Image (tube, rainbow, N blue to C red):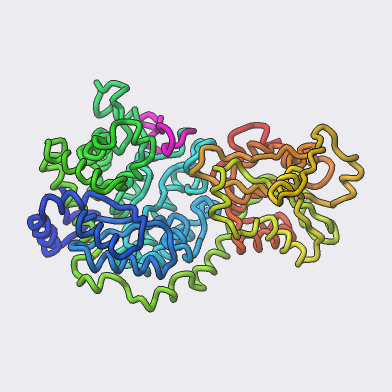
Amino acid sequence: MVDMKAKPFFLTDEDCKWVEDTIAGMSLDEKIGQLFFNMGDSRDEEYLKMTVNKYHIGGIRYNPGKADEIYEQNRILQENSKIPLIIACNTENGGNGACVDGTPIGCQTKIGATRDPKYAHDLGYMSNKEAAAIGCNLSFAPVSDIFLNWENPVIGLRTYGNDTDQVAAMAKAYLEGAHENPGFACAAKHFPGDGLDFRDQHVANSVNSYSCEEWDATFGKVYETLIDAGLEAIMAGHIMQPAYTRHFNPTIADDDIMPATLSPELITGLLRGKLGFNGMVLTDASHMVGLTCRMQRKDLMPAAIAAGVDMFLFFNDMEEDFNAMKAGYLDGRITEERLSDALHRILALKAHMGLHKKAKTEIMPPRAQVHEIVGCAEHKAAQKEIADKAITLVKYKDADVLPMIPERYKRIMIVYVKGLEAPGLGALFNQNAVSPADKLRDRLNARGFDAFVYESPIQKLMQQIQRGEKADLNLYFAGKSAIKDFVAGQDLIITMVDIAGGFQPVARPAFGMTKGGGEIPWYVHELPVIVVGTQQPFVLADIPQARTYINTYDSLDTTLDALVEKLMTGPEAFHGQDPVDAFCGVWDTHL
């Protein structure tokens, strides 16, 4: 049974009465609706009213938009919903996880490189101050996974590191910062913990393969820390944990081992029982293959609630999904006790947020303060400070390369290397974006260098084809120009590897089939070469020959400003400490 007076809800008798009275006054359809988190795909007023009036949703996570758009959407929803809504955001890295004009404070790995929980606290406070300003009240953060396998394709830059104590301390600091915003709550993810498997639950099964003892000492320690600190909600991942599943169900067949979202052993046994978590549990997004490969959709929705989960993310087809969940209750798969338990946790969380004490027209904060908070100067200053503290000189074998000043290296070639990405997506979301290489070139030239961005023959060929010009197909790939000519053309080379971390099956450099492999830094013994990873921090696995290697964790303007300053100052200017083993556990990356 839910103890609404205990952690993390701490409800008064009056609050508890509101929960009980509200549940007693709800129709069956209203109860079923509370189990759903909708992924809003429209900000049309009639659509928003329909979701709360017809389907009675308990919460919403919406598609990105500007602060004013999100504020208006949230106002319509709260003013028209019979029961106040949980409105969630993905503020893992900054206010830009709540609205596109929010402040990107710094990704979690960048925060981890500072080795200072203060910055995790600031991330939690500032990100969710911006989110709260536009009407959000729950963050799907902190990501509490531990990056124990550099080939994991999901976590990317969404972790505070590979050290359990650091992840626990920084996740807790984020939570405490978020809680400084009145009525704001957090949902840590992805229970039982990602970062071990090399697969991605978006497209395949995912397994946390630790023994019970190993899990207790790592992921379990992180969740215990957060639960003790008052964490309100936990997002269950589509991740199997066979050891604890078998611990709670010794006779279970391998075929019956389920991801946490469908596993009573992991939700009811491990999370509720062993860890004593009294808060709300919600699923990760329900379109991921780690979930959908286990059973038919009409069955997995009630199965998730029956396993002990309280809220289901997200609708596919509203009518179809609603009826499937309702059928699961009517035929007994969701028991009356389990439905009551879920409703008590959902409404207790809303009461914990104080939503029940406000009139519908007073739930939203004043509209006038949106632009005083979102993207404010204080948050941008924090972004700049974090960049200074985080940029990491991971490898420095040529101890005389830095400082990089025009008197030593006037002519600088920047080689820009992208990753293997989903076709067209980069162009779709970055149609007007200036590449980090061009930004770095401009900054260097402003400081007295003669910098240029290398253009490969393949790039030139593709541009000719795109412009409809006659393409020069007379390319060869075996030979190179004379070394003396190559060395005479520039004094230093910066290889900038810009590969996104997380949310893609492959995150590796896509070295072009250029003349002589021009993008591959084969020339490390011919000229000084500085390799910079601007996103995911595991570039050394593919460029072990790099003798000077730097991780910046992003390519924000403030980060590139700090990078140039540090390059021109010397190795003593780099303060970041590698949080994830950028050497990838491979011996030759140290050479």
In the depicted structure, whether residue 503 falls above or below residue 13: above
Residue 411, x across and y down, in percent: 83, 56
Residue range of the region highlighted in magenta in the rendering: 198-220
Could you say which is closer to the camera, residue 478 or residue 442? 478
Residue 51 appears left or right of 128 = left
Measured from the top left, where is residue 299 in percent x and y?
24, 35
Q: Which residue is painted at 84% across and 58% down in the image?
A: 410
Image quarter of the C terminus? top right
Query: Compared to 317, does 268 lie above or below?
Result: above
Residue 464, percent across and down? 74, 48
Mark yes or no: residue 129 visible. no
Viewer-side residue, 145 vs 376: 376
**Measured from the top left, where is residue 129 in percent x and y?**
39, 67
Rendered image quadrant of residue 387: bottom right
Q: Residue at x 28, y 54 (%)?
A: 232
Q: Residue at x 30, y 38 (%)?
A: 261
Q: Is residue 93 magenta?
A: no
Query: Is 422 on the left or on the right of 509, as rendered?
Result: left
The kind of secondary structure the magenta stretch mainly shows is loop
Instruction: Indicate left or right for 387 with 93 as reference.
Output: right
Does 219 appear in magenta?
yes
Q: Give the number of marks.
A: 0
**Residue visible at 54% across and 64% down in the picture:** 383
* Left or right: 141, with 454 as reference point: left
Q: Residue furthest bottom?
A: 368
Image quarter for residue 355?
Answer: bottom left
Q: Nearer the viewer, residue 485 or 233?
A: 485
